[in-house]
């Protein structure tokens, strides 16, 4: 028999923010951000700022981007957020300048304690420093830090921290080679 | 030259169910289940039951869940079906109680015989016992059985059966460690 | 400090085609192709041909197919394009006859030069010969050629060329066995 009992799951300690803000974001985010409508990136940026995102200048936001909570998002100048990127930020996601999140990337901040009968929620911040590139369809796990200029190959799973100027790839991602920028 | 001839593909032996039911489900499922509209899980459950799904109590169904045929779906009490989960159930999918399917999971029941010129359809049931957790963006292959409390890590590919209380991960997924619930 | 400067990114050498064609395609493609509406495959094929796709007879196009530029797409007779397939064809994608792209497949033709400060765009054609099968949720990388009857397993990452009648799988995909068609 299983001892897991999801009826006893209790994430009441987690602060989702005001209900009204979440509800309005759910609707507006769906209409303006998580859509294929050709809405200018500047307008998307304005909307995200209204909901508390700390965004730099010249940010590119492609269609069908799925952001859980804009008030837990920080993005630097010139950064690209690709088509169908999913920023599932139950915890703070800090993205630097000149970062590229390619199409289909998922940044995952939520986890569960599989040792507890109540499957307790655990969250972990994600930090991607300046110049980082996350390849298409890759998944970055909760708690991960990528230092300056780190690269993750396509379709990879990253659950470790990546030092500066290193290229990692695979599932699970491992060190491949140094990144040398000319 | 290729010998494969998809013009001769014949899945007429496969019983998709009445055409009208499929057509109505295609429309209703898209409007009520496979959507970001904030529709209460209880209402989603009622609709799925109308189309033949055997569902327990207290089931959570997140947005954008894609279910092929509700009449081939069984889910136990307290189970969570995460955002963008894709249950591609051409064959029966039986999910126990207190199961968590994290966001972006795919349960795949269809396959093809690559040895046949006509690329014959092959289907395989999926069974996930009580207390199972399938991690975000993972794919479970046709025919797989996960015993009680089995865990699959994120972004994994599972094509083998997982014994009770074991944690598997990777692509292809392999045994990682025992799950001990306190 | 990062040397990467995406403000200096310059893809002006890349010919996206006339602006008006792209705009109209963006709208029409979303309404007719990248949708769950039950639109007949024949009508989808006609629309894609209008936008320059070279398509054979008896092609199956399932719901929610995402095609970047139809004018860079060629598909042979009897080929299947599965649900949620994403053909991100910044470069030419040539798909033969009797090919199966299973659900959730991504064909990726765009890349970036991570050695350049300006993160230069690089594109690579993809060629899938007759009889090829790409498994569900797999990603095919820029420049890849799959010879006749090649098979790629589900949830795989393919960045190498696959010889005829070989089955590859995994992340990264490796040779598994020969495909023998009876």
Image (cartoon, coloured by chain):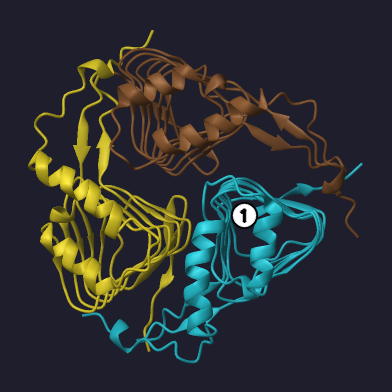
Chain colours: A cyan, B yellow, C brown
> Chain for mark 1?
A
Q: Is residue A9 left or right of residue A171?
A: left
Q: Position of residue A76 (x, y in %)?
A: 79, 62
**Is B155 situated left or right of A50 in this image?**
left
| Residue B43 locus on image (x, y percent) | 23, 70
Nearer to us in this view, A24 or B75? A24
Where residue A152 sits in the image (x, y, percent)?
Answer: 68, 51
The residue at 64%/75% (across/down) is: A72
- The quarter in which the C terminus of chain C is drawn is top left
Give the number of callouts.
Answer: 1
SS label for mark 1: strand
Q: Is residue B71 at least partly visible in the picture?
A: yes
Residue lying furthest top in this view?
B1
Quarter placement of the N terminus of chain C: bottom right
Camera-side residue: A116 or C179? A116
x and y percentages locating residue B108 in the rendered image: 30, 48
Instruction: Between residue C116 and residue B2, name the one nearer to us.
Output: C116
B160 or C37: which is nearer to us?
C37
Q: Which residue is mark 1?
A: A173
Q: Is residue B158 above or below residue A93?
A: above
Picture residue at 37% right of the left edge, 26% below the top: C44
Is the residue B159 above or below the residue A158 in the image?
A: above
Mark 1, residues whose alpha carbon is within 10 Å: few (<14), some, or many (≥20)? many
Q: Against A4, is C168 above or below?
A: above
Q: Is residue A180 visible?
A: no
Residue C169, located in which quarter of the rendered image?
Answer: top left
Q: Is residue A104 left or right of residue B131?
A: right
Name the residue rendered at 54%, 87% in the picture. Answer: A15
Image quarter of residue A119? bottom left
């Amino acid at each position: 028999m299983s001892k897991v009992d999801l009826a006893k799951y209790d994430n009441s300690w987690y602060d989702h923010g005001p209900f009204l803000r979440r509800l309005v974001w759910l609707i507006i985010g769906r209409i303006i951000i998580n859509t294929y409508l050709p809405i200018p990136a500047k307008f998307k940026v304005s909307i995200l700022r209204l909901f508390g995102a700390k965004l730099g200048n010249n940010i590119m936001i492609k269609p069908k981007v799925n952001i859980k909570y804009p008030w837990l998002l920080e993005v630097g100048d010139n950064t690209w957020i690709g088509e169908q990127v999913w920023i599932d930020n139950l915890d703070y996601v800090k993205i630097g300048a000149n970062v590229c999140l390619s199409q289909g990337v998922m940044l995952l901040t939520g986890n569960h304690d599989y040792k507890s009968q109540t499957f307790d929620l655990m969250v972990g911040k994600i930090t991607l420093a300046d110049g980082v590139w996350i390849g298409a369809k890759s998944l970055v796990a909760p708690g991960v830090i990528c230092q300056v200029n780190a690269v993750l190959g396509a379709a990879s799973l990253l659950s470790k921290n990546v030092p500066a100027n290193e290229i990692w790839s695979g599932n699970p991602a491992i060190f491949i080679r140094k990144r040398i920028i000319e």
